[in-house]
Image (cartoon, rainbow, N blue to C red):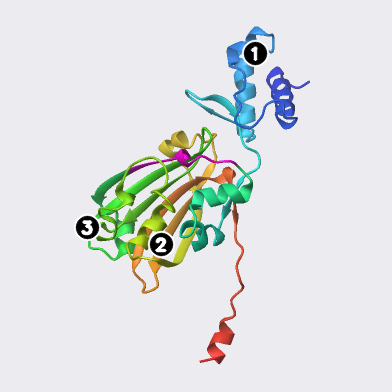
Amino acid sequence: MAPKWRELADKLAEQIKNGEYEPGQQLPQIRELVAVGEGSKSTVHAAYKALEAEGLVTSARGHGTVVRQQVPLKRLGIARYDKAKWRDSDEVAFIADRVASGRSYRRNEQTQTVSLIEAPPAVATAHGLPAGAEVYARARLVKEGDQPTHTLTSYYRPEHVEGTRIVDPTPGPAGRGGGFRVLYDAGYEIDHMKEAIFARVATPDEAKLLQLPAGEPVVELHRTTYTASGTVVEFAIGVHAASRFAWEYDFKVPDSAKGEKGQ
């Protein structure tokens, strides 16, 4: 016979899968289930911990136990940076992901802080700056509803962004078209990018900020953005909750041999 906590966990899991508890909805507080006879405090706590380990819920102090979104967001690759989205319209990258995923969004689901700091070593290297040089750091936390999905911090040379909307800490994208549109208007049209991604264990601060269940890894993104002349106009580091994104790429397959023959 399965222990009482396992029976309760299975019952709640079935209710989640049947839609009785929807993504983003908070499960009853432990004391409420104890009061209706679902078991002792330790039984309910063990059941909730099992659901968290199985990826069905998240639990964080002050937020309770919340049902997780089971269908991950599409994190578009090349298509999220289409110039028509941010130059000619107002579809910044995180919004492009939501649109592609058929999910709703609010612009204020992106919050940010902006500060002038000494460039960390990786940032100085990316920008070709000497040690100790200053850069603007624009740190964003992006949520879907009340659930954080990822952080993204972009680093810029002061001479590229001083006096622009990029250094305005108002929550939400940096005005119409976001940061890329600001750079475009300042004469720094983005031309190509390099992205590197890798998975790692979340730090305690990241786990708290992103409301991650115990043991969930994060995907770290490094993005370097260039103009056509090769000037680096942004270096960004993102930290993504691994289970909340499905990374999607659609691109033309290169054939370098053709290029060599044409030379």
Dot 1 amino acid type? Leu
Would you say the residues marked 2 and 1 are in contact, meaning their CB atoms lie under 8 Å apart?
A: no
Q: Quadrant of the N terminus?
A: top right
Q: How far across and how far down the image is residue 70, in percent?
A: 65, 39
What numbered label is drawn on residue 33?
A: 1
Q: Residues within 10 Å of mark 3 (few under 14, many from 20)?
A: some
In screen coordinates, is 224 left or right of 118? right
Task: Say if the magenta span includes residue 174.
Answer: no
Name the mark nearer the viewer: 2 or 1: 2
Please give the range of residues in magenta: 104-113
Task: Point out the tag, 3 or 2, that comes first from the N-terminus.
Answer: 3
4 up-or-down from 154: above or below: above
Q: How crowded is mark 1: few (under 14 residues within 10 Å), some or many (20 or more)?
A: some
Task: Please report the residue visible at 57 percent of the width from the left and 47 percent of the height from the top.
Answer: 98
Task: Point out the tag, 2 or 1, that comes first from the N-terminus.
Answer: 1
Q: How far apart are marks 3 and 2 (CA)?
A: 18 Å
120 up-or-down from 210: above or below: below
**Badge 3 is on which residue?**
133
Task: Point out the tag, 3 or 1, that comes first from the N-terminus.
Answer: 1
